[in-house]
Image (cartoon, rainbow, N blue to C red):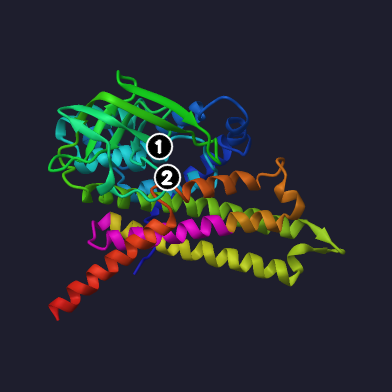
Amino acid sequence: MNFDFSDELIQLRDEARRFLASRCPPSVPRRILEGPEPYAAELWRSVAEMGWTGAAIPEEYGGVGLGRLAVCVIAEEIGRSVAPIPFSSSVYLATEALMLFGSEAQKQAYLPKLAAGELIGTFAMAERPGASDPRKLTANINGRALTGTKLAVPDGDVADFAVVAVNGGAGPWLHIVDLKGPGVTRETITTIDPTRSHARIAFIDAAAEPLPGSAGPDTIRTLLDYAAVPMAFEQVGGAQAALDMANAYAKERFAFGRPIGSFQGIKHKLADMYIQVEMARSNAYYGAWAVHTGSAELPIAASVARIAACEAGWFVTKENIQTHGGMGFTWQMDCHLYYRRAKLLGLALGGAREWKQRLIGELRARNTTDTAAA
């Protein structure tokens, strides 16, 4: 039994790694971090030309048709390079929402432009700090006019449209809104990682187009499950890069005439980091299997992938800074680029605590069903 990706996908991963090593060295996210640009536009165009934005989109809609596993392997390399592009919001969320719940006309209108990188999409859900419960959303639809306010929308300041979660009652719970149209006000907000911009978006009777397949709040949960898996791969990629950085520094930094990696304290630190990364990778692969096969285990697989990736991302990037010692805390070192991204992604789609509650709920439901069947 083969637990790895296919040869085709491994080749795609290797090509993505080489491409991003060349086109997205640390100087690129640093430029975005220190300058006025919201994202690396030239890198985004190159990524679209490589076909990555259309990796999961079927060929009849202008995509490459490689499937969702291809997005997972690309996501890992984007995380490894902390690429400052709106890939996750546009590909994991907006594109996925259209593929899952959009009408044929909507797919024909949006997917080819998303695949070509001509449109940037995002997903707007959170309305207040704390856990986001789809059943407690206050954004509402009156006819086809949407009113409400969404907080911390990823890439909301640069996106062309948003898939907005609303309290739809008996109707669709997801609607497409043109963010450049009337009734939409956007305000860029500050986060721990400015290389991935966020915005507060207010809608006042903004024209909204429903995704007809999104009836009920569970459709929002389904979208989050599908997005959580490539997000986990992106987090694993960043954690792996931080581990590699710490390992390399431990070999080249000398203290008392020896590499610091020869000291037991550093050895144990690196071993703990390695274990966290591999546990997160294993759970991400479980999630990838569930997404690829359309398994009923997806809610559980997505939850464990998300939890393990959040914990690994935080722990490994933190310990990378500690391994570098006093130098690790300085602006000149690249450690903070990975720590910032890990903290930001750890809250995207809901934090680890929310996903733990989701996992507990899914396991309880499964146990109740099994008990009743017995």
- Which range of residues does the magenta coloring cover? 292-315
Q: Please tell me whether residue 307 is drawn above or below residue 158 in the rendered image.
A: below
Q: Check disc 2 and give the amino acid type.
A: Pro
- Tell me: 45 left or right of 111: right
Q: Please tell me whether residue 208 is drawn above or below residue 14 in the rendered image.
A: above
- For label 1, the crowd category at 10 Å Cα-Cα, with few meaning under 14, some 14 to 19 and many 20 or more, is some
Mark 1 or mark 2: which comes first in sequence?
Answer: 2
Q: Determine the residue located farthest toward the right in the rendered image.
A: 257
Q: Check disc 1 and give the amino acid type.
A: Leu
- Number of the front mark, 1 or 2: 2
Q: Tell me whether circle 1 and circle 2 mark residues in contact (CB < 8 Å).
A: yes
Q: Main secondary structure of the magenta part?
A: helix
The answer to whether residue 28 is seen in the rendering is yes
Estimate the x, y position of residue 102 in percent, counting from the top left.
19, 37
**Residue 129 numbered mark, or none:** 2
Residue 76 falls inside the magenta stretch: no
Q: Picture quarter containing residue 182?
A: top left
Residue topped by disc 1:
151
- Tell me: 306 left or right of 27: left
Estimate the x, y position of residue 234 in percent, counting from the top left.
46, 49
The answer to whether residue 64 is seen in the rendering is no
